[in-house]
Image (tube, coloured by chain):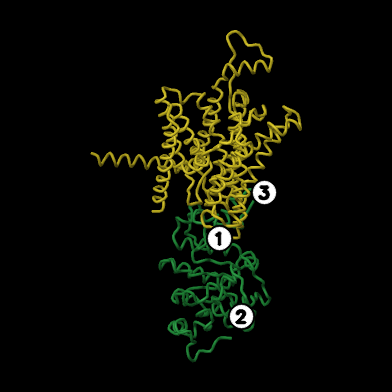
Chain colours: A yellow, B green
Amino acid sequence: MSVTTAGASQQGMNTFRRLFARLEIDERLLGMVASLIVIWIGFHILSDGKFITPRNLYNLSTQTASVAVMTIGMVFVIVIRQIDLSVGSILGVTAMIIGVLQARWLPPLVGLGSPSIWIITVIAGILIGAFLGAINGLIIGYLGVPSFVVTLGGLLIWRGCAWWVTTGQTVAPLDQTFLLLGGGAFGTLGEWGSWIFALLAVLVIVYAAIQRRRRKLRFGFPVRPIWAEAAVVGGQCALVVAFAATMIAYEMPPGAVKQLAEIKGWVIPAEGLTVAEGIAYPVLIVIALAVAGIVVLNRTRFGRYVFAMGGNLEAADRAGVDTKRMTFWVFTLMGALCGVAAIIGSARLQSAGNSIGTLDELKVIAGAVIGGVSLSGGVGTIAGALLGAIVIQSLQSGMSLLGFDASLQNIVTGLVLVIAVFIDQLYQRRRKV
Amino acid sequence: MADAKGADDGQAMNPLVEMRNISVSFGGVRAVDDVTVDLFPGEVVGLLGHNGAGKSTLIKVLSGAYACDAGEIWIDGAVAPIHSARDARKYRIETIYQNLALADNLDACANLFLGRELESGVLLDEAAMEDATRKVMNRLNPNFQKFHAPVAALSGGQRQSVAIARAVHFNARILIMDEPTAALGVQETKMVAELIQQLKREGLGIFLISHDLHDVFDLSDRVSVMKNGKLVGTVRTADVTKDDVLGMIILGKLPTGTAQPR
């Protein structure tokens, strides 16, 4: 009896495998999506229906954004078989500098509230981050000091510098336009903007799929059956639309509506006014950077060399890849993304304090690793790593929703990380056999 | 016969490669000491010696991985300064290393074009690269089908054929193969041997490096034997027995009564 059940379930598994093979979907990615759904439903039940709500998912999306941006860079770093432990501290010092820049230095120069403030601040944030990353890259790539040591030092150094910028004072208030980059009540696309974005995204997904298929057919390469193609593209489009709809379903809090009405000169009718939030700006930044990152990693020479270096550094060297320069640029890119994360993070918190980004390096690395980026290098996807970041953030925000202690949150996150790496190794061992 | 041509007409035509009086030192150790070897088009020269005899070091000078302290490399009768892997590539020298120098996580196509990717604009032209890979692999190993699997999933022979395909696709004239069949089974060794014959017919010059005589004796037209960084001698495989060569490797002496060719 038990034998037949096992046989039947095995057969069921194989049917699934074959289905995924036809769809050309990575079964690992699907496994991650499944565990994310389990986590969400679990928290939803435990919190009496508070987790899977537009409000909570909206907050989750803006909370994840800063870590997600850095996770994109961390994929590059880990795939070339390096590590960057300094990302949280680079975020911290960058956030402090741009906080002071926009709150104290720029207003006397260009006038308080000048629209140039946020633009200068954003550019400065990215450049400062890139510069700090470049220092890492120089020492690791050209001087050959192990990245673990260099960035462990950086973790302390830049956190110390973050304190030094204002000798520990928190910088606030920040520029009003700058704050929109963190989401908040007004930093969103709104209802129509979100629908237009979803429509554009669907068009891009469909167009890209058609192009890919055409290119393959032109050379006579095998393509997946049309039903499978339609299922995959349809699934992606449905995800986009569902996300947009959820974000639109989140209504602006009444206080914010009142503020908005005042600014716009609207008259609020007696029965009240509902304004949809829609997709938050920081999430748009993440999506844009993720798409760019995926293209660079998978469709350019730079990305190809990133994988080659992680797979066999010597082979890459012999093939003429300038591995030192590549290392330099990967860490510089990581730094620039820390700069972007500093912008999003400080804008979301509406202030810059010297502890901003503390322990973010662990969230970023954990997200990437949970998302299937192998610490032994050469393997990883940005999509997977971002899913991993969402998993980590879901765990944390779910646990705080349930009123778990911060200490307990750390324990659970740590356990999940170790278990995820263990599962990863099981998976790799199985693949080798 | 095409096989013998390179060696027979050797005196008449320029050698493809001449490494003249090459010396390489690491610290106080002379890894290669005044060694001269040459290679003609369509010829296979085996480079033999124990581990540490200096054969790998010598050949890395040719592939641009090491600089020599003394000596010159001549290609097509002209001095060829080779200081880097890029220089070696310019002279169409391709090396297939012992550990294969493939990135295990990438597929055959990505490995074949590693360092020389085709691009359309700023993006990789994956389709064109796959097309070219399919063409060259069809020529070398028609049974090969795993174009999208990471090369870690391929057999030793398949990996070897990817490495050779890489050299062939980029029009190598001089091929350096380090222990070409050491890691392979009987069938796969046979496959590689056939590949080498085909490349000879196409006029390539091939250096085979091995510490195992049996690995290269039957494939080579000539063998050069090294011991302790010095060249023991170069003999035509048609003129000697395996035991003669074994004596050269172990004792470091030329077999009695054998004149050195040229």
Q: Which residue is mark 1?
A: B136
Residue at 52%, 53% (x, y): give it. A310
Disc nearer the start of the sequence (3/2): 2
Say above or below: A150 vs A19. below
Please identify the quarter of the rendering in which residue A88 is found. Answer: top right
Query: Residue lying furthest top in this view?
Result: A270
Between the residue at mark 3 and the residue at mark 2, the CA separation in whole angstroms equals 46 Å
- As helix, strand or loop, the secondary structure at mark 1 comes to helix
Circle 2 packing at 10 Å, graded few (<14), some (14-19), many (20+), is some
- As helix, strand or loop, the secondary structure at mark 3 comes to loop
Viewer-nearest of discs 1 and 2:
2
Query: Label 1: chain?
Result: B
Q: Which residue is mark 2?
A: B21
Give the image location of residue B154, x and y in percent.
45, 57
Of B19 and A208, nearer the camera is B19
- As helix, strand or loop, the secondary structure at mark 2 comes to strand
> Could you tell me if residue B241 is visible in this image?
no
Disc nearer the start of the sequence (1/2): 2
Say above or below: A404 vs B218. above
Disc nearer the start of the sequence (1/3): 3
Q: Which residue is mark 3?
A: B121
Q: A90 left or right of A9?
A: right
Residue at 65%, 40% (x, y): give it. A126
Give the image location of residue B105, x and y in percent.
50, 53
Circle 1 packing at 10 Å, graded few (<14), some (14-19), many (20+), is some
Pointers 3 and 2 within a single chain: yes
Viewer-nearest of discs 1 and 3:
3
Between the residue at mark 1 and the residue at mark 2, the CA separation in whole angstroms equals 37 Å
Say above or below: A342 vs B243. above
